[in-house]
Amino acid sequence: MVRDVSFGQYFPGNSLIHRLDPRAKLLIFIAFIVIIFCTFNYAALGVTAAFTALFLILSRIPIKFYFKSLKVIIFIVLFTSVINLFYGVGDPIWQWWVFKITWDGIHRAVMVTIRIICLILSSSCLTFTTSPTELTDAIERLMSPLRAIRFPVHEIAMMMSLALRFVPTLMEETDKIMQAQKARGADMESGNVIKRARALVPVLVPLFVSAFRRAYEIATAMECRCYRGGSGRTRMKTIHMGRRDVLAFIAIALVIGGVIVCNIFLGKTV
Amino acid sequence: MSALLELKNLSFVYGQGTPFEKKAVSDVSLSVNKGEFIGIIGHTGSGKSTLVQMLNGLIKPTEGQVILEGEDIWKKPKEIRKVRFRVGMVFQYPEYQLFEETVRKDIAFGPSNKGLKGEELDKAVERAAAFTGLKSDLLDSSPFELSGGEKRRAAIAGVIAMDPEILILDEPTAGLDPMGREILLSQIVNYHKERGNTVLLVSHSMEDIARVADRIIVMNQSRLFAFDETKKIFARGDELGQIGLQVPQITRIMQRLRGMGYDVPDGVLTVDEAFSAVCSLLKKEGRIW
Ligand SMILES: Nc1ncnc2c1ncn2[C@@H]1O[C@H](COP(=O)(O)OP(=O)(O)OP(=O)(O)O)[C@@H](O)[C@H]1O
Ligand SMILES: [Mg+2]
């Protein structure tokens, strides 16, 4: 079923990571992503990998869901690592036609694989532990200074949260429509690519119809409740930075420091 | 009589292996004979829709078997589509499945998947439209221009056109006006009588079920609560009340009359029956108000 994808799903919980302020989480996540791609040797990469592992453990979400989210991107990982494998410079240790493998290429491939895995695991950690509402709330608050230059922060955040809100609904809808068409003998599991693409028409048409209908309905419902944009709105749930958020910032500072120290003192692998 | 459809220890769990695990059907065993009209009732969330979706292989039971004419429908998973032509399923709110340019084409989707062509296909479409009372001049308009009730009819016709041996309807009358419900229901009954096929009808309306069903499946909290003849089920008013269901109003009235000492028969299910019972009682006692 379509609904079984675990990538990007929120798992309610009460772990340390769940309770972090979403703004802090988002900032830390961004910093962490940047630092993952600024690792120049294995020691630095090791530091980030260790912290990724720490995040996963602290999130208290069964490890199998992280594996599931990795399964989704396994092809991307393979593809990029193979490309990197053949793009090394230096003396070839194996060569065939234009393909050559060098130690440099092997190092690149290993590092890129570990980086992507860390990236996926940490972003899964973020989405597993932060509800879409918290996330858009955090984005809105973090971007609010942009309001000074008349950037429509609230509108964009509202659009994002509406879109996120409808992801599960639309998935459910897709599922239902697929079931209904299968009940009428639609064949979606066999045939070649063209046949399969054609088989999607009976699913996509009703899906679009209902998506438009829902969009109108939600617009009407918002108007009925006198929604008139962002100015002057207050929030039901306010978010506050606390002690644990400060600790989290200290932790990420340590990671950044660690990576920089490793980069400076241990030289470049690639 | 050998059973047409047999369920053996059927269970279904949504989202198995995730934190959202939800047992929707547990350990249901029963068998349905050819030509029966079966009603399915139960509180909302009791697992009725989940149960019926397993009957034509739309979802695979997590445990247990669905046996259609002696053969497990999941024995050859590749041929599950064949089962879907034999067991037709009309979903709750089926109108969202419409997608073609014209109603005619949409109704033809099922039968043409089944392999019907040309004249045969046209005939199947026209007949199905007639069965559901869809006016023939609507057949060439777009399904999105129809009213809610007409859409519902078109969607039901799309399943009936496949001419299934077993027809499952999941709350076909939900959200229709009283007149529309009445007409649709009698059309389903007529269809059943004419075709002699087996019908399973899920409904929240006890009155409807009482009028049309031979036997009733009662679901309660994912389990099979009872499966018996209509009269016998509705004679158990107290038990039904405990699981949040009711017997038809007229049955309740007659039970109350009996309780007050009047000699009316037990298990009256329709207003007509009640009317003749009360009339004969009045005649016997010689009292006319
Ligand atoms: N796709 C799904 N994913 C997860 N849980 C589901 C899903 N569909 C139904 N459920 C759950 O399974 C249980 C049984 O649902 P089902 O739809 O079979 O009930 P029902 O008897 O048809 O109710 P109703 O009368 O409201 O249609 C419910 O508790 C519901 O929350
Ligand atoms: Mg239902």
Image (cartoon, rainbow, N blue to C red):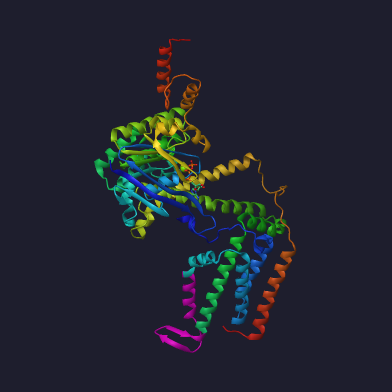
Q: Quadrant of the N terminus of chain B?
A: top left
* Closest to the observer, A15 or A142: A15
Q: Is residue A229 left or right of residue B230?
A: right
Q: Which residues are magenta?
A: A75-103
* Closest to the observer, A27 or B33: B33
Specify whether residue B134 is in view.
no
* Closest to the observer, A49 or B240: B240
Residue lying farthest to the front in this orientation:
B261
Q: Is residue B195 left or right of residue A57?
A: left
The structure residue drawn at horizontal position 44% and vertical position 84%, both measured from the top left corner, is A100
- Provide residue B212's location: percent of width, then percent of height: 38, 31
Question: Which of the 4 image quarters holds residue B100?
Answer: top left
Residue lying farthest to the left in this orientation:
B119
- Provide residue A174's location: percent of width, then percent of height: 46, 51
Residue A77 counted in the magenta span: yes
**Rendered view: B155 above or below A54:** above
Question: Which of the 4 image quarters holds residue A192?
Answer: bottom left
Residue B66 counted in the magenta span: no
**Rendered view: A75 above or below B3:** below
Question: Which of the 4 image quarters holds residue B98?
Answer: top left
The structure residue drawn at horizontal position 65% and vertical position 82%, both measured from the top left corner, is A262
The structure residue drawn at horizontal position 52% and vertical position 79%, both measured from the top left corner, is A110
Specify whether residue B179 is in view.
yes
- Provide residue A22's location: percent of width, then percent of height: 67, 60
